[in-house]
Amino acid sequence: MDKLKALFGDKALTYAELEAALKDSKEIKLANLASGQYVDIGKFKQAETQANDLQAQLAQRNRDLAELKKLDAAGIQAQLDTLKGKYADDTRALTVAYPSIERFCADAGYRGTFTFDASQTLGRGVDISEKIKPHE
């Protein structure tokens, strides 16, 4: 409201005076709400894209869930075994691709499963630090 007060001052304006005062204003923009101009097109497109992405993700999750519901315990186990094999193949490929990596370094939060997996799957040890500080 203060911006409008500054625009009008202490007097009434004709339409022509109002139009001239608003022409160069960067703070006040008028729009015809009936035409839908009250939403910036960039913001609308961004929201529309986000909504479409979320709908696509939800549809994929629904398809994944439907596939999982079709599986029995043996099917789930077979799928798990397949994924474990793929994981093992991928990790072996990484050790071949990066032979210079001899050990890993991690903070205390990675103790346990990560250390075990790195040792058993990759054949690499892990040095655990209580708190890793940024290099200065």
Image (cartoon, helix red, strand yellow):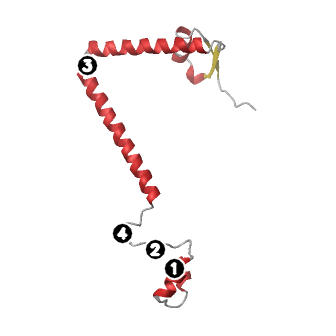
Give x and y (percent) for residue 75: 28, 15
Circle 1 residues within 10 Å: few <14, some 14–19, many ≥20: few
Q: Amino acid at mark 1?
A: Leu
Q: Is residue 90 left or right of residue 34?
A: right
Towards the viewer: 135 or 94: 94
Marks 4 and 2 sit apart, C-alpha to C-alpha, by 12 Å
The first of marks 2 and 3 along the sequence is: 2
Q: Amino acid at mark 2?
A: Leu
When the figure is inspected, residue 37 is found, relative to residue 46, above or below; the finding is below
Q: Amino acid at mark 4?
A: Ser
Q: Residue drawn 42% across and 13% down?
A: 84
Residue 25 in view of the camera: yes
Mark drawn on residue 35:
4
Q: Nearer the viewer, mark 4 or mark 2?
A: 4
Q: Nearer the viewer, mark 3 or mark 4?
A: 4
- Residue occupied by mark 2: 30
Q: Secondary structure at mark 3?
A: loop
Give x and y (percent) for residue 41: 44, 59
The first of marks 3 and 4 along the sequence is: 4
Q: Is residue 23 left or right of residue 65?
A: right
Q: Residue drawn 29% across and 33% down?
A: 62
- Residue occupied by mark 3: 71
When the figure is inspected, residue 72 is found, relative to residue 55, above or below; the finding is above
Circle 3 residues within 10 Å: few <14, some 14–19, many ≥20: few
Q: Are marks 2 and 3 in contact (CB under 8 Å)?
A: no
Mark drawn on residue 4:
1
Marks 2 and 3 sit apart, C-alpha to C-alpha, by 59 Å
The first of marks 4 and 2 along the sequence is: 2
Give x and y (percent) for residue 63: 29, 31
Q: Residue drawn 42% across and 56% down?
A: 44
Q: Secondary structure at mark 1?
A: helix
Mark drawn on residue 93:
none
